Amino acid sequence: MSTQNEADPHVSSESTQRDEPIRILDDDGNLLPNAEAPSLSDEQLVSMYEDLVLARQFDQRAISLQRQGRIATYAPMTGQEGSQVATSYALEEQDWLFPTYREHAAKYVHGMSLPSLLKPLCGLRDGYAIPDDVNVLPEYIPIATQVPQAMGMAWGHHLQDRADTAVLCHFGDGATSEGDFHEGLNFAGVFDVPAVFVCNNNQWAISVPRDQQTASDTIAQKAAAYGIEGVRVDGLDPLAVYEVTRCALSKAKNPTDDERRPTLIESVQYRYGAHTTADDPSVYREEDEAEAWRQKDPVDRLRNFLYGEGVLDETLEDEIDDRVDSQISEAISTVEAAEADPAHIFEHVYEELPDRLREQRDELNALREKYGEEAFSEVLE
Amino acid sequence: MSSAATPDSDRRTDSLTLVEAVQDALYTEMTADENVVVLGEDVGENGGVFRATEALYEEFGGDRVVDTPLAESGIVGTAIGLALSGMRPVAEIQFMGFAYPAFDQIVSHASRLRSRSHGKYSAPIVIRAPYGGGIRAPEHHSESKEAFFVHEPGLKVVCPSTPADAKGLLIASVRDPDPVVFLEPKLLYRAFREDVPTGSYEVPLADAAIRREGEDISVYTWGAMTRPTLIAAENVAEEYGVEAEVVDLRTLSPLDVETIVDSFRKTGRAAVVHEAPKTAGLGAEIATTIQERAVCYQKAPIKRIAGFDTPMPLHALEDYYLPQAVRIQDGILETVDF
């Protein structure tokens, strides 16, 4: 992946033009001329498809739960799940993932459970309690702050000679305007760290369109300013995203003499829905804008591709739909049965509980004892 | 309260200034633990603008004493990431007044990585910054905004006033499992020398120190303000027979409430001296802590002797802004005579 894709035999020659996003599948999910599918087994491809279906169903269910008041504000990912799933498929188990609040599917694929994705949406912090063998950070909600941190962790791995480990950091198009994006990428170039920075350019930062975010023609081109490689990929083409990310991770770990480790991937995509369940996109953009993107839908494209390959049929599709449906229902039941423990407020603020916090915890406990749990919801309601 | 303990096997000392003690602490910890790295602006070959990292680059090399690009948020964000990878970064912010670009990284991430990951991750980093006025520095180079950081749960805030404490507190900070904002009184960097143990030792991040004992009033302070406070205490003792107890907090978060309150129970009067603006400064927290726990011992209103609620003036007027011995002395007498 020395420049765009000239050296990469897996991608279509049609995308060799400098700023065109790299694609492997056409809009209908057919392999493009001269493009080669990534070396994924049939099982892996079907599993990737199942995760895409799960991501889409999860999204629809989460939006519906929010409408019913059963979860709080939710950031939907429909239209973007193909890129999320594919980037995480490219990760190896030991690689680290820095997600934002929208990367539900990316986290799931890299090892987080469905209940853990839903718990923070129910206000339960233990959703951020990441299992020991899962290399995922709690989602980043401030914009772009994860970029220097991902850079720092990648640098730390590098300094400690963990040559098999890379870091993948997600952010959106809006984040590229933040100082931390610049600082993180600048550091990454200077210290040449094994990190892959994925800009999920979904064209909108809440209500502000991409062309108001930067006068740059592309986001990938910003990489040039940091002396690192920038790549544009069709973010609705899961196979292209997978291949581009895999190459970038591989280069991060084993660069050739004339390559630098970091890559900025601009995954060109579209947020079909709202920024979160708290806004209404019809206020700031044309409803039909999404249509052109929906024609290239990642779930449809991968499904069509797999049908074409003869590895997916209606029976398997139904089986996947049913399995995903019950998985999500089960996760929702688990999370809705969970209860918040007020002790969590005071836990893990410091490694050891300072005296002052102990006193404050005891004070709260004494009040709970005295007035009962009900009393604490009276004022807010 | 405890004091710096020297191991029996090594009672050798060096006569060091405070900034030399900072360097000695970094040298000691970097020698003991190869995961300790120093990063910041001009900390490498230049040895830091105050020479706090002098000779470390030559000793430990460019992978462990790292000149970063000029970007405070990048420095602290990177330090958090390094800590996540298992390292022990010590980040230098060149002056406290330039810490603000990193504020988001400090308060949104370093301070709460442990709690928001429910205990899985933490950010054991040290953020060193020279703070405070009195050296005729340009604008933005004299800030004393410890209250910003004391207000943030999950952070520890440390401020030494002597070379021996600077070394022991900094070593303890590097080893601490939580993020520490380590504020160095640049007015005292080269103000005096004292004997500092040559070996490795910790001063716990929990204990205030009684610098002078007295029965009539407790005067709470830290960092650079300990010096004019001690001078004021000697003056009022000599001229008026008033014996002030001077409590050097050393660690500003968490506060050593026990030492603060015990001293007040003895004296029944209190003054707090800090160079930061008065309103919502740490003095307010100390006064309230005393009220909450020892109001029955109180003989006079608690006096705050602080910087004014104005921007730090340019240096021609900083002597009027910073609490000098005369203001402290006046505040002590006003409180004792109430």
Image (cartoon, coloured by chain):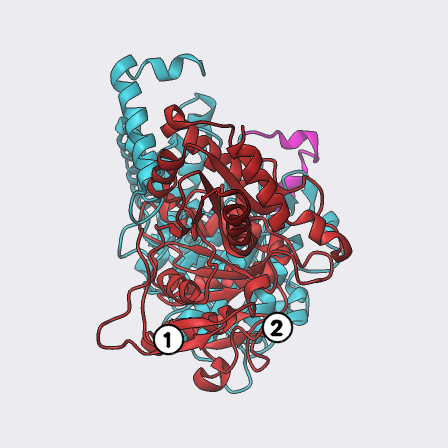
Instruction: Give coordinates of residue B127: x percent, y percent.
Output: 49, 60
**Mark 2 secondary-structure assignment:** loop
Region rendered in magenta: A278-300
Residue visible at 50% across and 82% down in the picture: B57
Please indicate whether residue B108 sits to the left or right of residue A207 in the image.
Answer: left
Q: Which chain is red?
A: B
Instruction: Give coordinates of residue A197: x percent, y percent.
Output: 53, 62
* Viewer-closest of B275 and A98: B275
Q: Report which residue position mark 1 lands on.
A: B28
Q: Report which residue position mark 2 lands on.
A: B49
Instruction: Give coordinates of residue A54: x percent, y percent.
Output: 38, 42
A283 part of magenta stretch: yes
Question: How far, Cα to Cα, is label 1 from label 2?
Answer: 20 Å
Report the chain holding disc 1.
B
* Viewer-closest of B266 and B257: B266
**Mark 1 secondary-structure assignment:** helix
Residue visible at 61% across and 70% down in the picture: B69
What shade does chain A have? cyan
